[in-house]
Amino acid sequence: MSTPLLQACGIEKKFGAVVAASAIDIDIAAGERVSLIGSNGAGKTTFVNMITGYLKPDAGSITLAGQDITRLAPRAITHLGVARSFQIPQLCGELSVLDNMLVATACQDRRLSFFQPAHRPERLARADALLERFQLTEHRDRRVAELPGGVRKLLDIAMALTGQPRLLLLDEPTSGVSAEEKFPMMDIIMTALGREPMTVLFVEHDMDIVERHADRVVAFYSGRIIADDTPAVALATDDVRRYVTGTLREE
Ligand SMILES: Nc1ncnc2c1ncn2[C@@H]1O[C@H](COP(=O)(O)OP(=O)(O)O)[C@@H](O)[C@H]1O
Ligand SMILES: [Mg+2]
């Protein structure tokens, strides 16, 4: 078998008495679309934070294409091709949509200093192409602070793609967005991502969206993985129905 793109082995993480991750073992192949599900506090964000280096596990190892990244700083992990979006978008509200994109593009570019003008036309073209893919062109010159929440989330994800990552982690890309907006928004995201040979892990609470966009589901409960399978199989297990979707009620 070829080396998995991402491999987490025996991950443990506690916050005081709270077990946020326990015995987490997971292999993810390049190109997979994996949804991380679980009720609030199950350990999904902790898992994302450990892969991206924001948190260090107490035990266990994480490898990216065979390289140990367990103890690397977030910036080093980003440069190896791992990008993320946040539950709350990390944007500069006073700048325009385009300027946010250009800052993200410049941050990814390690060849030159931040304000070096030589590569501006190229960065502008890359930023505009991403805005187009995420249907953000009409908002290009607007101040981010004036934008609706859904548009900000799309921008946050577009910015995460400026470095052309091979692994993208999306923590609740549709949280805080109205029920009617969620579906079209996730369609925009997945269509935009579809053109890249990219591996995507996304945290999602809406099981209709999970079934539509994931080819694999990893379910967390109390820091443990309680199911890891295709959506159809994982969502039908007793544990997922009991602890995640609430569709199995004990008499
Ligand atoms: N920085 C932290 N300090 C203390 N406890 C934390 C911290 N981050 C997460 N936790 C706890 O770890 C558990 C898992 O949290 P989290 O990974 O955020 O869950 P999820 O994203 O699935 O809602 C929760 O009980 C949460 O309160
Ligand atoms: Mg979370």
Image (cartoon, helix red, strand yellow):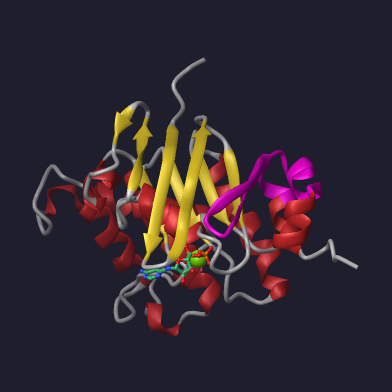
Asked if residue 99 lies left or right of residue 83, the reply is left
**Furthest residue in direction bottom, as rendered:** 146
Residue at coordinates 65% horizontally, 63% vertically from top-left? 205
Q: Which of 52 and 165 is in front in this view?
A: 52
Q: Which of 69 and 240 is in front in this view?
A: 240
Please, is residue 132 above or below residue 39 in the view?
above
**Furthest residue in direction right, as rendered:** 251
Q: Nearer the viewer, residue 28 or 162?
A: 28
Residue at coordinates 79% horizontally, 43% vertically from top-left? 232
Quadrant in which the C terminus appears = bottom right
Please, is residue 234 above or below residue 14 in the view?
above
Residue at coordinates 54% horizontally, 39% vertically from top-left? 195
Please, is residue 5 above or below residue 210 in the view?
above
Tally of numbered discs: 0
- Where residue 31 sits in the image (x, y, percent)? 53, 33
Q: Is residue 126 magenta?
A: no
- Where residue 78 sits in the image (x, y, percent)? 29, 47
- Where residue 90 sits in the image (x, y, percent)? 36, 70
**Furthest residue in direction front, as rendered:** 17
Which segment is the magenta one? 211-237
- Where residue 80 sits in the image (x, y, percent)? 28, 38
> Residue 140 is drawn in which quadrant?
bottom left
Please, is residue 173 above or below residue 93 in the view?
above
Q: Does the magenta stretch include residue 217?
A: yes
Asked if residue 131 lies left or right of residue 78, the reply is right
**Furthest residue in direction top, as rendered:** 1
Asked whether the viewer can see residue 158, the reply is no
Asked whether the viewer can see residue 51, the reply is yes
